[in-house]
Image (cartoon, coloured by chain):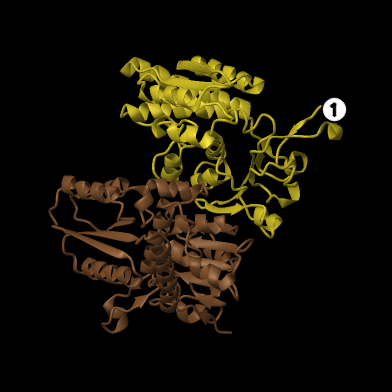
Chain colours: A yellow, B brown
Amino acid sequence: MTAEIIDGKAFAARVRGQVAEQVARLKADHGITPGLAVVLVGEDPASQVYVRSKGKQTVEVGMNSFEHKLPADVSRYDLFALIDRLNADPAVNGILVQFPVPDHLSEAEIVARIDPAKDVDGLHIENAGLLASGQKAMVSCTPLGCLMMLRDRLGDLSGLDAVVIGRSNLVGKPMAQLLLRDSCTVTVAHSRTRDLPGVVRRADIVVAAVGRPRFVPGDWIKPGATVIDVGINRLPHEEDGGKGKLVGDVDFDSAVRVAGAITPVPGGVGPMTIACLLANTLTATCRVNGLDEPEGLTA
Amino acid sequence: MTAEIIDGKAFAARVRGQVAEQVARLKADHGITPGLAVVLVGEDPASQVYVRSKGKQTVEVGMNSFEHKLPADVSRYDLFALIDRLNADPAVNGILVQFPVPDHLSEAEIVARIDPAKDVDGLHIENAGLLASGQKAMVSCTPLGCLMMLRDRLGDLSGLDAVVIGRSNLVGKPMAQLLLRDSCTVTVAHSRTRDLPGVVRRADIVVAAVGRPRFVPGDWIKPGATVIDVGINRLPHEEDGGKGKLVGDVDFDSAVRVAGAITPVPGGVGPMTIACLLANTLTATCRVNGLDEPEGLTA
């Protein structure tokens, strides 16, 4: 048996297509164009690439993209003044400050300053609280993308045994909340878990988010399970003939022979992140305007 | 084998003793007396009894107790004005509005109005978010009490398999967060769980919070497990010769023969609630004054 390989690139393109369709309808029916503001502090090359890519995709789905570039030594005061302006600006429905920021700024303070309703990264404590209590929240993009893929593959998740490996605030914990909301029986496993192979072997759904290359071997996977690999680990050059290859938290080559479906790395969960950011911006726009949530694009 | 029966009354008295000791130290060292404000709307007899009991225990541990009784037809405006005054009052460290409130008032709105730092019931969305992201929160009293009992019985919980049956915002979900924070491998099971007996049988720690009388039989319990029964169900009179006996979510008579330790109903988790409310009020007082957290009384 060989697993279906879930094509994250194609899936993300489909999500962007759905977003574009609903943005067009918003414009036509209500004269509303969603807007996403991205704030970049300093000149980190990787961040610049990422911000450019976000801006491009934002415009492609028909939204307004607002880019704010601040010098690396911008004061906390000036950054907060900008966030306050974006919070107050009705043309801005989503605000994202690109991390990491220089050391003199606090990411926690920045997140706390953003209006939770515009927090399209789903990082604000209020959104964590809304998610934890089963209310409408902005959900962080990576777990939202994983959920979309799982629903697409499995339909109704109710009653399935799901194991989330890793308990980070960014992925593991919100992922567990989302699976619980969809009525899975959810187990959160982590570095202190005693019999991790045994725990994983019980699962119909495995979400690996530990950040350790090829940590989950195929013989931990229950035959037919759906495996979502959130890890993106760059192998040391020595191990890989100098290329520094990207691998996931799951040992793909052995897992693909056991699982029912699996996301590859790269090309699995990764491409979903920006697509979900756009979906969240659309959701935020609908909510602030008292319109129905965009179908199929929310938790 | 017969389980140790965890005496919740004695445990709660011990917690109140610890609170009283630390309150006395706060007074002596810093001239600070913690204050708990309880707001009662209307004249529900059960609520009156409960509020009286809270007031009495608050004074017994050396704290100030402030009781505010409002008529059943109090306006939302007047209730909020009171909450705002309590939020602003430095003598008040904890605020509790006794639920249920009359139908014209919204419990969600009331909770949202309370300063999260004074939300000693741990109901505010911000506290849910802080808990969900592993930060210092006000934790709702029942799960906090369960955690204290588990730590007392088991010491370090790290690596233990814990199953929480039930996913309510008040008990199941915060309980799961607390167990995860203490590094248990945590499974949340619920009405949609397919093989509940199998899931429960794996657990070193079982927390039952489903609200169904004697729902968990002894043969679901792993020998030696610690069983915390949060349920308080009154049996219909017919089934019980007219007394309307209180029973838990666990079938005590069969479970006590298998478990290593178990809380009875009544006299288990129940008595811990007010003790934890007092502990939370002390914690809130320490935090707002920039003092160390009270030892052994927080999550």
Judged left or right of residue A50, residue A29 is left
- Percent x, y of residue B170: 39, 57
The answer to whether A253 is drawn above or below residue A39 in the figure is: below
Front position in the image: A112 or A9 = A112
Against A2, is B66 above or below?
A: below
Residue appearing at x 56%, y 35% in the figure: A142
Residue topped by disc 1: A242
Instruction: Say few, some or many: other residues with alpha carbon within 10 Å of mark 1 (under 14 / 14 to 19 / 20 or more).
Output: few
Tag 1, which secondary structure?
Answer: loop
Left or right: residue A195 versus residue A72 is right
Quadrant in the picture for residue A282: top left
Task: Pick whichever, B118 or A90, lies toward us.
Answer: B118
Pinpoint residue A214: horizontal percent, then vertical percent: 75, 42
Residue A18: x percent and y percent? 48, 24
Amino acid type, mark 1: Gly
Which residue is rendered at x = 21% and y = 67% of the image? B48
